[in-house]
Amino acid sequence: MISTLLWGAGLGVGLWALAIYAFPPRPPLRALVDRLHTMPAPPPILTADSAGWALRVGRPFVKPLGMLGLPNRKLRNDLAVTGKGIEHHLAEKAVLALTGLLLPTLVYLIFTVADVGLDWEMPAIASLVLALGGFLFPDLSVRQEAERRRSTFRHALSAYLNLIRVLLAGGAGVDGALSDAVGIGKGWAFQQLRRALITAKLTRTTPWSVLGQLGTELDVHQLSELAASVSLAGTEGARVRLSLTAKAAALRTRELTDAEGEGQAATERMSLPVVVLFGAFLIFIGFPALASVLGGL
């Protein structure tokens, strides 16, 4: 019964993938019309790196996976934050899935050659489980890395706003304060801010509009809100300075609250091993007495 279900599921998935590859779904007419009337989007500020052995090995699977609508929009944003190309991500998913699918089969063949009796159902189930895990593992890894980078960027943004506020209080202009403050900091976050300001100079646009675009690409709404509020403030140093001070205070409060929440969650997780150890100790103490009572009945 299990073997019949496995063969049927594999045949169905294979036929479905073959049909999608041979007859890819067409986009709806409304989407095509909207694409004709939409204005071209500005070039992205975040850059993606598409290189590595996974892309060379899994390149034939990139197009079929892309036809299935992978990855979704949220995962595309996470890939942009981590600097990982979409093709590289899809190729890595395909390579890991194939590795998980073929590894139990290889072990089964080795046991068969060594004349070790082993049923084929267990390797088949293990292949499916490992293939699914290998297919989903890159998504989880990208999400965790993107959240870590967003948190790092929020910390750097708070420091950046404080630097701008100090420079404005010293009599510097808005553009000069933005350039001088971003030149002081180091790291990935300040590198993205520096690239955004260079893009604003090259395209002759306001720095706050480019910083708002960077906030949208990073999915850091604090930067987008800051760009919107300061763009309304105009070029008056006092008003800009007040807006930056308020936003920096709000960011520090947010980071402090998140740090306290993470600390409380870590404290609660630390209590779990103690509870498990206490339960095991109770079983160790009470099992002999319970066994003797049950043996005397």
Image (spheres, rainbow, N blue to C red):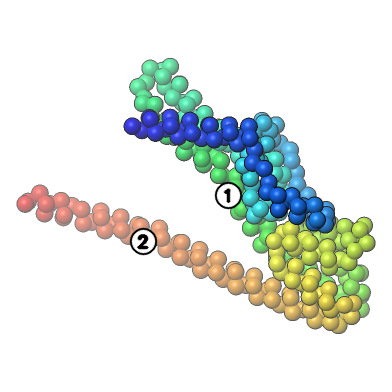
For the N terminus, the quadrant is: top left
- Residue picked out by circle 1: 140
- Mark 2 is surrounded, within 10 Å at the Cα level, by few (under 14), some (14 to 19) or many (20 or more) other residues, namely few
Query: Of the numbered discs in the image, which one, if any, rests on residue 275?
Result: 2
Instruction: Locate residue 243: give its quadrant.
Output: bottom right
Instruction: Locate residue 91: give its quadrant.
Output: top right
Determine whether, in the image, residue 267 is placed left or right of residue 237.
Answer: left
Q: Residue at x 38, y 60 (%)?
A: 274
Determine whether, in the image, residue 5 is placed left or right of residue 77.
Answer: left
In the foreground, 221 or 164: 221
Amino acid found under the numbered disc labelled 1? Leu
Q: Earlier in the sequence, mark 1 or mark 2?
A: 1
Determine whether, in the image, residue 34 is placed left or right of residue 270.
Answer: right
Instruction: Estimate the x, y position of residue 251 in percent, counting from the top left.
Output: 69, 72
Instruction: Estimate the x, y position of residue 109 in percent, counting from the top left.
Output: 45, 21
Tell me if residue 91 can be seen.
no
Furthest-front residue in this view: 29
- Mark 1 is surrounded, within 10 Å at the Cα level, by few (under 14), some (14 to 19) or many (20 or more) other residues, namely few
In the foreground, 163 or 55: 55
Instruction: Estimate the x, y position of residue 297 in percent, counting from the top left.
Output: 6, 52
Q: Residue at x 63, y 45 (%)?
A: 69
Instruction: Estimate the x, y position of residue 33 in percent, counting from the top left.
Output: 76, 52
Amino acid found under the numbered disc labelled 2? Val
